[in-house]
Image (spheres, rainbow, N blue to C red):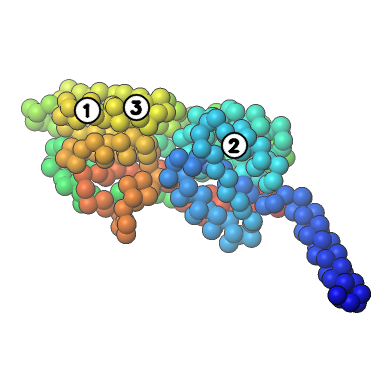
């Protein structure tokens, strides 16, 4: 190889290294603007991460997805996220929800802000979110249950009910936002602050059952968490108002374990309950595997086509499953980063 070619290659290599160095400096030494952090065991979390990545990239952000297998490797992966990104998005992920305090203990001291997919996670580790009312989500699920139990509605043809964008509320945790250098503008409600508390009430215009049949409902909730708790409570309150003393509930909690969900729903099947409420995706998946005859209503489930592995999902499952989704519009969630001037 001639000396001229060697020199030319050396110049090209030097220019490449300098360009890479400046690229890194322009991004604060980070590999991406926003890290997308989720549990790989939760199919709906992966779905949200993939979709919001598209929305964030439309806004000019670079993103990188980081998944962890379970709570045992959460800290290790999260420390990598903090070192490589300017900010983090956490979807409505049950494992993250159960470990929100741990997530905050890593991100807040590092000054890395989190936009969360729902209010409970935001309260534990985030700076802002678009909030839905999980209590109201439970009420909507109860209305569907009434139609199935009393009016013999065909659950296989019932549309999955999604959150209306008009009902979303921008919420924040101002003290944490200040600590990580995020300024919260007007228009956000402080979680736990003045004006944030809204009394959960059941609508007065719900139908009233006048028949004699008594209905048994099995409730399988994945884990105790404010959002899931509220959905279950809204469901029970509304259905009790509609059915009075003609409904009984067998409410059970799986303590975050998918195998326990299967055990619980199999008990419901053996008791031949009239309907199963599956609160969160693993509970829904367990119930769908346990019976193809007992009506199953899901709630706090993000995307039913993904959860149930339905090709060409059109909003109806075609099987003994329907329910309500807690998916807030991801484009609006992505826009929170821009509105709050995060990762700019």
Alpha carbon separation for disc pair 1 and 2: 37 Å
Instruction: Give the labeled residue for mark 2.
Output: 126
Instruction: Give the labeled residue for mark 1.
Output: 268
Alpha carbon separation for disc pair 1 and 3: 13 Å
Disc marking residue 181: none
SS state under label 3: helix
Residues packed near mark 3 inside 10 Å, few (<14), some (14 to 19) or many (20 plus): some
Can you tell which quarter of the image residue 214 is in? top left
Q: Quadrant of the N terminus?
A: bottom right
Q: Out of 309 and 173, give the one closest to the viewer.
A: 309
SS state under label 1: helix
Most extreme residue toward the left is 212
Tell me residue 323's x, y (percent).
29, 43
Q: Out of 8 and 152, give the one closest to the viewer.
A: 8
SS state under label 2: loop
Asked if residue 33 lies left or right of residue 256, the reply is right
Camera-near label (1 vs 2) is 1
């Amino acid at each position: 190889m001639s000396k001229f070619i060697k020199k030319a290659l050396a110049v090209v290599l030097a220019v490449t290294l300098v360009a890479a160095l400046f690229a890194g400096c322009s991004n604060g030494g980070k590999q991406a603007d926003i890290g997308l952090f989720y549990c790989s065991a939760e199919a709906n979390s992966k779905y949200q991460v993939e979709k919001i990545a598209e929305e964030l990239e439309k806004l000019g952000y670079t993103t990188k997805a980081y998944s962890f297998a379970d709570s045992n490797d959460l800290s290790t992966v999260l420390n990598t996220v903090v070192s490589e990104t300017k900010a983090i998005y956490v979807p409505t992920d049950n494992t993250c929800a159960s470990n929100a305090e741990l997530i905050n203990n890593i991100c807040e001291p590092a000054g890395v802000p989190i936009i969360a997919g729902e209010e409970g996670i935001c309260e534990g580790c985030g700076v802002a979110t678009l909030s839905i009312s999980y209590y109201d989500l439970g009420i909507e699920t109860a209305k569907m249950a009434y139609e199935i139990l009393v009016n013999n509605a065909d659950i296989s043809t019932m549309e999955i009910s999604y959150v209306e964008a008009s009902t979303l509320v921008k919420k924040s945790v101002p003290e944490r936002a200040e600590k990580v250098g995020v300024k919260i503008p007007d228009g956000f409600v402080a979680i736990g602050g003045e004006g944030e508390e809204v009394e959960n009430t059941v609508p007065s215009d719900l139908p009233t059952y006048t028949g004699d049949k008594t209905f048994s409902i099995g409730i399988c909730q994945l884990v105790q968490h404010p959002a899931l708790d509220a959905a279950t409570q809204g469901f029970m309150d509304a259905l009790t108002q509609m059915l009075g003393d003609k409904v009984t509930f067998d409410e059970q909690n799986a303590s975050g374990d998918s195998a326990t969900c299967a055990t619980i729903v199999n008990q419901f099947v053996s008791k031949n309950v009239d309907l199963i409420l599956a609160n969160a995706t693993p509970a829904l998946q367990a119930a769908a595997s346990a019976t193809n005859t007992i009506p199953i209503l899901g709630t706090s489930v993000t995307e039913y086509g993904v959860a149930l592995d339905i090709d060409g999902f059109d909003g109806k499952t075609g099987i003994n499953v329907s329910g309500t989704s807690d998916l807030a519009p991801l484009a609006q969630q992505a826009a929170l980063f821009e509105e709050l001037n995060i990762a700019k």
